[in-house]
Image (cartoon, grey):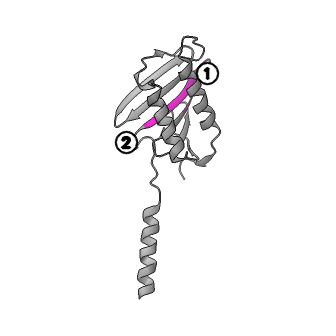
């Protein structure tokens, strides 16, 4: 009897340790979305980082096509801190151009969007460098979960 109770307690503890998994559509906490779009084809590529480290990718404004390998807690915090420390949350840029890039910060229904032309020389360098670094980091992540799995 004691062994059964011990096994049940261990099973319960293991189930509680499992990390909660979310989707960008149901997540209420902070998230950063970066994307590129426009051009002749009008294609869109977008990455969404949740504050819990989960990372998603989608194309052409469809639902997020897959989940990518998550980022670590420290790396995720650093990305969110950099966004605030660089004061990107106070920038008011809405000049998309033919080819464009964007940052979106969302939290609990509030949204701040920065959008600029891919070849706009007047875009703050800090913004374009941070965007390029994140895009490279996110692009190199492997898919771990596809839709309907």
Find out whether residue 32 is within the magenta segment: yes
Say which of 148 and 122 sits in front.
122
Q: Looking at the image, which residue is at 53% across and 17% down?
A: 124
User: Which numbered circle lies on residue 96?
Assistant: none
Q: Position of residue 98 (x, y in %)?
A: 57, 14
Q: Is residue 28 above or below residue 126?
A: below
Q: Looking at the image, which residue is at 59% across and 47% down?
A: 69
Q: Tell me the element at label 2.
A: loop
**What residue did someone put label 1 on?**
41
Determine the residue located farthest toward the front in the rendered image: 85
Q: Position of residue 111 (x, y in %)?
A: 38, 29
Q: Quadrant of residue 132?
A: top right
Circle 1 crowding by C-alpha within 10 Å: few under 14, some 14–19, many from 20: few
Q: Tell me the element at label 1.
A: loop
Q: Position of residue 20 (x, y in %)?
A: 44, 54
Q: Is residue 54 visible?
A: no
Say which of 24 and 132 sits in front.
132
Q: Is residue 139 above or below residue 147?
A: above
Find out whether residue 136 is within the magenta segment: no
Q: Is residue 98 above or below residue 74?
A: above
Q: Looking at the image, which residue is at 47% across and 36% down?
A: 80
Q: Which residues are magenta?
A: 31-46
**What residue did someone put label 2 on?**
28
């Amino acid at each position: 009897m004691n062994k059964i109770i011990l096994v049940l307690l261990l099973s319960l503890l293991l189930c509680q340790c499992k990390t909660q998994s979310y989707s960008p559509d149901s997540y209420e906490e902070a998230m950063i979305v970066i994307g590129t779009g426009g051009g002749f084809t009008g294609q869109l590529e977008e990455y969404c980082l949740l504050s819990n480290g989960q990372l998603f990718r989608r194309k052409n404004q469809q639902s997020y096509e897959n989940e990518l390998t998550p980022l670590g807690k420290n790396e995720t915090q650093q990305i969110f801190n950099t966004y605030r420390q660089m004061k990107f949350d106070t920038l008011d840029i809405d000049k998309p151009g033919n080819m464009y890039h964007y940052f979106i910060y969302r939290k609990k229904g509030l949204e701040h969007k920065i959008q600029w032309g891919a070849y706009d020389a007047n875009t703050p360098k800090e913004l374009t460098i941070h965007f390029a670094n994140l895009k490279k980091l996110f692009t190199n992540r492997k898919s771990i979960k596809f839709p309907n799995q």
